[in-house]
Amino acid sequence: MNIHEILDPASWLSPSGGPRYIQLRRRLENAINSGQLLPGTPLPPEREIASITTLSRVTVRNAVQPLVEEGLIVQRRGSGTIIANKVAKVEQSLSLLTSFSEDMARRGMEVSSTWLERGIFLPSPEEIMTLGLKATESVSRLSRLRSADETPLAIERASLSVRLLPNPLIVENSLYEVLTQSGNKPVRAVQRISATNLKALDAELLEVEEGVAALQIMRVSYLESGQTVELTHSIYRGDAYDFVAELQLPGEPKAGR
């Protein structure tokens, strides 16, 4: 079935089917999920889709934009609109303190990193406060694009006191592996997860459209002594990650209390 047949309104547009833009969005979404529209398939220009479907260009735009935000469709200047490559969801537990390398290795995935920044710098006010530094101390910063099976999944930006990581250049793959060797691997962490929309630079690195949904995580990890080890700000592709937490009901209060 070609794109004109998929968009032919005779097969899906109905007066009782709800708003027209929702019907078109549903039609495109079903075609993508069923494999009728394969990854890399170009979509006609907005004007042509409007002509095929007998809908207005505004209606077409309202149908397509949510699919762009969900990562099902990619719009790029110079290359038009195409069906996005499907990314297998990675499920990560929030109850385990592990590194990206450890997570992907357990899944049998090939991990690779592209360094964006690695060196010693003067600390920011946030780094001074979080890492418990003096204003005259320095921090080691590690920023990299993390990929699994050649698919970019996350951007990690970590900061550590130079007392714990005096030479950031020795980190080649796993930061936690280096910290383990020096006796400074964290044993617990506090994470804060929030939703965000990708800015242009991060979207380009993750090979998705600017403005699409992503997960933003700030993590502060600690040694057994309570000393702060690292402050990490990470951005994860929203279409590639599911974070899972196991919850338990609190125990019944004891009698007399």
Image (tube, grey):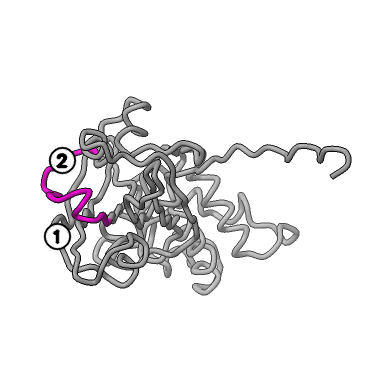
Residue 193 point in image, percent of width and height: 49, 55
The residue carrying mark 2 is 172
- Give left or right: position of 198 versus 182: right
Q: Residue at x 28, y 39 (%)?
A: 176
Classify mark 2: helix, strand or loop. Answer: loop
Q: Nearer the viewer, residue 235 or 151?
A: 235
Look at the picture and state if 190 lies above or below 97: below
Magenta stretch secondary structure, dominant:
loop
Q: Nearer the viewer, residue 28 or 3?
A: 28
Residue 47 point in image, percent of width and height: 42, 70
Residue 107 point in image, percent of width and height: 37, 27
Label 1 and label 2: CA atoms lie apart by: 16 Å
Q: Which residues are magenta?
A: 159-174
Q: Residue at x 56, y 57 (%)?
A: 25
Quadrant showing the C terminus? top right
Q: Residues within 10 Å of mark 2 (few under 14, many from 20)?
A: few
Badge 2 amino acid: Glu
Q: Residue at x 81, y 41 (%)?
A: 253
The residue carrying mark 1 is 120
Depth check, mark 1 against mark 2: the one in front is 1
Residue 145 point in image, percent of width and height: 25, 50
Classify mark 1: helix, strand or loop. Answer: strand
Q: Residue 152's mark? A: none
- Residue 173 falls within the magenta-colored stretch: yes
